[in-house]
Image: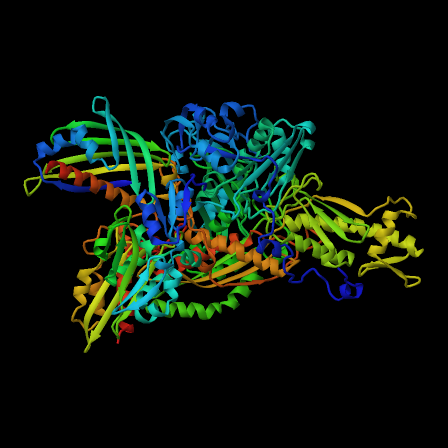
Amino acid sequence: MATTIAEIQKEKQVGKRLRRREDPRLITGTATYVDDIQMEGMQYAAILRSPHAAAKIRSIDTKLAEKAPGVIAVYTGKDTEKVGAVPCGASLPGLRVPHHNILAVNRVYFVGHPVAVVVAQNRYLAQDAADLIEVDYEPTAAVAEPEKALASGAPAVHPEWPDNVAFTYHQDGGDVDKAFAQAEVIIKQRITSQRLIPMAMETRGVVAEFRAADRQLNLYTSTQIPHLVRTLVASMLSLDENRVRVITPEVGGGFGSKLNVYAEEALMGFLAQKTGKPVKWIESRRENFLCTIHGRGHVDYYELAAKRDGTILGIKLKIIQDVGSYLQLLTAAIPTLSVLMMPGIYNIPSIRADIVGVFTNCMPTDAYRGAGRPEATHGIERMVDILADELNIDPAEIRLKNFVANDKFPYATATGLMYDSGNYAAPLKKALDMVHYKKLRQEQAEARKQGKWLGIGISTYGEICAIGPSPATPAGGWESATVKVEPSGKVTIMTGACPHGQGEETTFAQIAADELGVSVDDVLVVWGDTAVVQYGIGTFGSRGTAIGGTAVYYALQDLKEKIRKFGAVLLEDDDVALADGKVTSKKTGQSKSVPEIAAAAYRAMKLPPNTEPGLVSTHFWEPPNFTFPFGTHIVVTEIDGETGDIKIRRYVAVDDCGNQINPLIVAGQVHGGVAQGLGQSLWEQAVYDDSGQLLTGELTDYAVPRAHMMPWIEAEHTTTPSPVNPLGVKGVGEAGTIGCSPAVVNSVVDALSPLGVRHIDMPLTPEKIWKLLRKGA
Amino acid sequence: MKISGSYTLAVPQEQAYKMMQDPEVLARAMPGCETLEKIGENEYRMKMKMVLASLSGVFDGKVRIADQNPPESFRLIVEGSGRPGFIKGDGLLKLSPSATGGTDVAYDGDVQVGGTIAAVGQRLLDGTAKILIKKFFEKLTAHAA
Amino acid sequence: MIPQKFEYTAPDSLKSVLQLLETGAKPLAGGMSLIPMMKLRLATPEHLVDLGKLKELNYIRESGNAVHIGAMSTHFDIETSPVLLRKCPLLAETAADIGDLQVRNRGTIGGSAAHADPSADYPAALQALEARFVLIGADRERTVSGAEFFADAFTTALEPGEIVREVIVPIEEPGTGVAYEKVVQPASGFAIVGIAVRIRRSAGKITFARIGVTGLSNHAYRATAAEAALAGKSGSAADVQSAAALVTQGADANSDLHASADYRKHLAVVHAARAIATALSRSA
């Protein structure tokens, strides 16, 4: 690419709305996903799964399957018992961790529990053979709802723990008893955040290849955390970590559902080792519904203490978290994030939180876009609205009254966090202006006189991003980057993050382009191969740019220093400056371009003092704190009084994620996040029946939002840089989802408030609304 | 899923009751029933072939009659499992004389479905149950005639 | 997601199709419902006969006072057919509301009708249109009415070996107002309820009304009580409401995760009123 220095000088790349460089291959279908991997002699695995939510396995007969055409192996839980357990990464005092075998042994605990696996020449023959396996189950009583599981006499999910309690957690901050004693008004509300299915467009998939002579396992898997998968799968299979290579090709969506280590990842490694052949498994959509982690699953009991002027004094929260049948990687940690986030962006001096994690005969819950923070935001934003209603204060006013003030940052919350920076009124005021709030309230008053249902919902959310400082995470919260200037001057960034839609192939190149003064097109961003990239953590928790990008930034600073040193040698002047892609002698005004310097650095004819040849720098960046983005979403709804149908008339999102590397990508993240937030607000719900059958087990019954169901999203922003990292960025991957649901529910509740409606649990189906209308009328 | 309803058979109550305890009659009336063999007192093994629209499946199962209180009520318990999943039905059937000299049969029960059919068939379950029950009573009627 | 082994034949003549059907093969007419069931192995036909190559079943033509629609006409064909848009707009309007564009490009009217999904869109319009169905087997051809054809959920008048050859709908008399109102199930795109209406007026009085209802119960039906209630009326708001209130009469409403039987009935009434009002506004 013949870009001249003069062209590059024209403008900074950071802050530009560059189109994503990854998109052409994604939208032309030329990207490589796990299912595109083909290997000589590759076999296919089909997994037989339990149709029962709870049963003893009396016997498994695999004889017919073994003899079926094309079958090379059949295994059951007895064969894989020595493989290490599917890991639980969260640690809480008293946490009960069920031993999670990769194939069920003796008992099954949820519908979809893997029971046996067939390896055959192709996926059709594998499935045919799996159908021939006969399992004699003795069904036992199941329980699928957390509150029912806690009731006395409920069936025990794990017989060894008859109370179904996986863990409890308590946290106090400030003086909550005093707050409630002083309260002039106390609001109580039960608020649920329903079970959701993450539904990445690409289901999970694994290809495993074992090279016996090298004792080397190559594992291709669709994951957000390749290095952690390597460490943990190596341990499960008792292999040397440095002989396991995890390769993550293109990942077609994760949303937290691929922030995990799954039984199938170890199982494919086991099969490749046992059969000596490469083995592929691609999760079907049906399996994805049943056996990839679910999200949310909260029943929350809120109590809020306030003064009659609207000042909030304290909150008590009891979270009943539906854990499911096992603890997956971060299952138990997710609701603790809700506790941290429970005061939202308000100055609430006292809190008390209790979590009880409850086993049910369902798929485990774990991180799903927002992970703990949407639940908390939904709760506090609903409670603030209910308080406003109780005190007859405008919901915008009551928020402004309780916001943490601009001069209070860094601000220590009652939950133990230190908010980095904020200007909470700015996005609220901007959003209110955008909807012409006062006029809109007048219109609402008019509409009500005419018997029309118009609602205005405000959500002023905050979130915890850039997860996170290592002490706050189970596996290290830093991120790594290696930046190389190749001999030709081209730049390669190897990031320990694992982008899968966040656009870092573009934004990291923008950062490097500005720092080195090279063209964005000269920068290659590489990730997702543990044999190529230094150890890293991965992409989740809105951390990619704020931590991964910062690691890139610091690696670039080291590199710039080295470029200056080599430039100084070439220019024979110690006083040089690096700018616009060249090092210039201040004395002579002569300069050498980065490619010229790179060639010299590798040729190594003349080394600067105490300097190694080459231009490579690696940086592991440990963040000193989380970052705390915030924003305001306002949703205007109209409700059909006859049918309960909800129409979103306006969706305004004003987000503040600090500095923006690429506003186009930021807007894309907000749009995607809002789409998923609307999904939870209006349509999505994983429904298990009392016997533990997943009733919404296909896309015919689980309503994922589609393009034509989306309202127009008016995305704007304010900018409050983070002091936590030199880029001033905060993170935006989850913001849309976190800000959305309370704005929608607040809007619909506001519309129905003349009926005395104060709360409606999600999803807001038209039938629910119709029942309220009918009851009220 | 709860199911309830009623159907009127054109035979007197005693006869209707007897008919519904008769394995041969049941075998003919149960939709898709291919074989029914006695395995115990009031307990039978059954092979059923269900065909509905493009869906089809073979179920192996059991039929059990319990809580007999002739000629007024009994419980019918049907369990079947096959590749598409499993079905369990447990219903109380109450007989009473109809206004026209026949027998009103009121049924009230619970149907539980598992496996693939549970996940994909939600939209169809209610309607399907109605069809199967209707067919059952129609065949009983045909037998009585 | 992985079907069982099956044989696949795509003959180019109707005759060969019918011969294969005699041997127990299953017809494939778009596959929008059948293929997903096969992928889940809930449907396991041994032999599929694809009707997709039968040019002789792919036409929309006017003949006499009717439009004849070949069974393999896709929903998109019907939605965009100039003949139907002019002569039988209700069917075109209904087709435009089916599923999504991909489904409309692949799915066919014959396949949809033969599948007789209780929540399908077409049956409402076909009932309101008093459509006739030409059924053909290896050794016979017969024509049945909508009332005969839609027997129950997934149950039609088709005998083994028979397929739908053609659907015949009337050419609307000038001045007829039509409308299709649908409540969409957000996951599947099927109708929770769908109401199709045709209305004509003369000298300020309703002289003709046909109302088809789908989604409510096990099969689409004509709401004859509501039709009768409209006859001779001026079509005032009160007339519309009282007629609409009768659309659920005699129907055994279904219930599922997406709508209870009560709500379905309520929606049927509300949307019947809206569809009648729209059709009236479009009538001369």
In-image side of A61 versus A429 (left or right):
left
Residue A194 x/y as whole percent: 43, 45
Res. C196 visible in picture: yes
The way the protein has been coloured in the rendering is rainbow
In the displayed structure, does residue A690 sit left or right of residue A521?
left
- The single residue placed furthest to the top in the displayed view is B40
Question: Residue A469 lies in what quarter of the image?
Answer: top right
Question: Can you name the residue that lies furthest to the bottom here?
Answer: C203
Q: Nearer the viewer, residue C159 or A431?
A: C159
* Camera sees residue A722: no
Which residue is at a point 34% across and 53% down the rendered structure image?
C14
- Counting the numbered discs, the total is 0
Q: Position of residue A174 (x, y in %)?
A: 55, 44
Residue C208 percent location from the top left of the image: 20, 69
| Res A106 → quadrant | top left
C238, A314: nearer the viewer? C238
The relative height of residue A116 versus residue C33 in the rendered view (above or below) is above
A327 on left or right of A7:
left
Q: Nearer the viewer, residue A463 or B86?
A: B86
Q: Quadrant of the N terminus of chain A?
A: bottom right
Classify the position of the C terminus of chain A by image quarter.
bottom left
Residue A706 position (above or below residue A358): below
The image shows residue A251 at horizontal and vertical percentages of 58, 46
- Picture quadrant where residue A720 is located: bottom right
The residue at 27%/64% (across/down) is C169
In this rendering, the answer to whether A491 lies above or below C200 is above
